[in-house]
Amino acid sequence: MAKTLDFYAVLWYDFPMENKKNTATNNPEIVTLSRAEYESQQAQLTELKLQNQWLLEQLGLAKKRQFGKSSERLQEGLMDQLVLMANEAEAYAYGTKNATEEQMKVKAHARKRQSGNVLDIVPEGTPTEVVEHRLSEEERICDACGSVMEEIGKEVRRSLKMEPARFWIQEDVYYTYACKQCESETGEGNLRKTPKKPTFCPGSFASPEAVAHIMTQKFVMYSPLYRLEQEFQRQGLKLSRQTMANWILQASDTWLRPVYDALHRKLCQESVLHGDETTLQVLKEPGRTSTSKSYMWLYRTSGCAEQPIVLYEYQPSRKAEHAEAFLKDFSGWLHADGYQGYHKLRSKIRVVGCWAHVRRKFDEALQTLPKDKRQGSPAAVGECYCTKLFQLEEILSELTAEERYTKRLELEKPVLDALLAWAEDASVKTAPKSALGKALHYLREQWPYLVRYLEDGRLELSNNRAERSIKPFVMGRKNWLFSNTPAGAQSSAVIYSLIETAKENDLDPYRYLVWLLHNAPERSQKDEDWPEFFLPVNAPKECRS
């Protein structure tokens, strides 16, 4: 009997008995199950609990993405629980802060005018139109004595005036001259024509100012061409979106693409780059449906570069071969996220992982927990480790690359070692499919790339620089939604590249494009290396923001 009981578990089920006198009376009944069935039900119950937990996490993350804050800043008190850091790091942090405060000099400053003054918001040199309001001579007659009053003071009220973008027609008249004396003596006229300046768009009435304005409105202000068409029509200008699109394509292919190629060559000469990619929909792509996903790739220089460069490239897929082809002349470090395609690049390109992605995953795991359970949770510990690294990086930001390399090994490597040891232990106790389990898996899988920033002081802790540069394209995509053809997508990549590079070099995109489109046609006839001249770094002062 004892042996039989070893293989059975006893479960109690209560079934209500129908009783007219007492409906609450229950009759317990014993049901026997084999141990295999019992263990199977327990495993199934555990799986359902994990599935329910995963669904609740996804619901919480969806609510946070839609209604919550995008900042990953830790709540007050969560950072206090992390006491595993090296004392040298804390001492260096506070020592640097105190030394900086002691050496800091208070800058002299002038008292600002009262808030709300229009002179505080307009740039220096803004023209002022003065409108004077005076009383007529009859209105200045004194009611008491009848004499004429004299002006003794004035009150100035300033207001900001604006007007919509105006348009006008420019006529370039080129005169022809003839020598009348030669004509009278020989009977043949000696003619001379005023030389014409080459135009950037032959056979079209487009001007550099018009095309630069349309490009700026679409790629800086994210206004689709159909909205520009409607705005122009309200002002009486019947300019179709098809005409504007043709202007953009022709200007991009003829004048902007050579400058883009020159920037590409300079980009590949750098030793540290950042990369990222995002989706794009192209409607009329040969051999693919209109709903297929295409990609816009981004490559840009790091903070150590003397000349900031931001380049976009359109490709129909996310295959690693596209990055390999674009970076064929590059060798060095490439900051990227956890996408495996970057890890397939040739050995001369050393991928550096992004700690912002790690912190984001721990933050998502933290947001799935109730607020009263976040303190002391493993998700909070993981995020605290990442935040400590960012805090130390902020302290070391003013050092040279060589000094930063040494201090990282001294201050940050102990934090990294402690984090890895903690992650190895925590992963054993965490469900793999949970938000925390995914964060720990990402951390351990990407670890060789995440610690690579310790190899050189010029490297950065995160790939946020690339994410900030790809955001303008994402914002524009939310408005114009898709590209019509692959040629249009590639032209958009070229224009975005020049505009974002201009912004990184403190240029006004509109002024820079006008300068380029005005002068490139004439310069291209005299100089084969004309694209080098029109790089954003060579733009004149009038193109500055």
Image (spheres, rainbow, N blue to C red):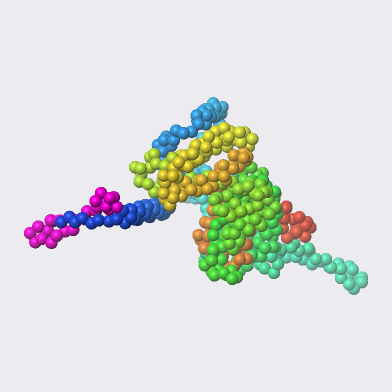
Name the residue: 41% across, 38% down: 78
Q: Is residue 194 left or right of residue 211?
A: right
Q: Is residue 208 above or below residue 347?
A: below
Residue 83 lies in the magenta stretch = no
Q: Is residue 410 above or below residue 128?
A: above
Span highlighted in magenta in the image: 1-26
Q: Position of residue 349 (x, y in %)?
A: 65, 49
Residue nearest the viewer, comparing 381 with 512? 381
Name the residue: 45% across, 41% down: 425
The outermost residue toward the bottom is 187
Q: Position of residue 445 (x, y in %)?
A: 52, 48
Residue nearest the viewer, comparing 223 with 386? 386
Residue nearest the viewer, comparing 398 with 540? 398
Q: Is residue 126 left or right of residue 85?
A: right
User: How many numbered marks does the figure carry?
Assistant: 0
Name the residue: 59% across, 39% down: 454
The outermost residue toward the top is 102
Q: Is residue 314 left or right of residue 72?
A: right
The outermost residue toward the left is 21
Residue 11 lies in the magenta stretch = yes
Q: Would residue 129 be visible to someone looking at this image?
A: no
Name the residue: 55% across, 50% down: 337
Q: Is residue 433 above or below residue 236?
A: above
Q: Is residue 188 left or right of residue 471?
A: right
Q: Position of residue 532 (x, y in %)?
A: 72, 53
Q: Position of residue 225 (x, y in %)?
A: 55, 64
Q: Would residue 270 be visible to someone looking at this image?
A: yes
Residue nearest the viewer, comparing 66 with 338? 338
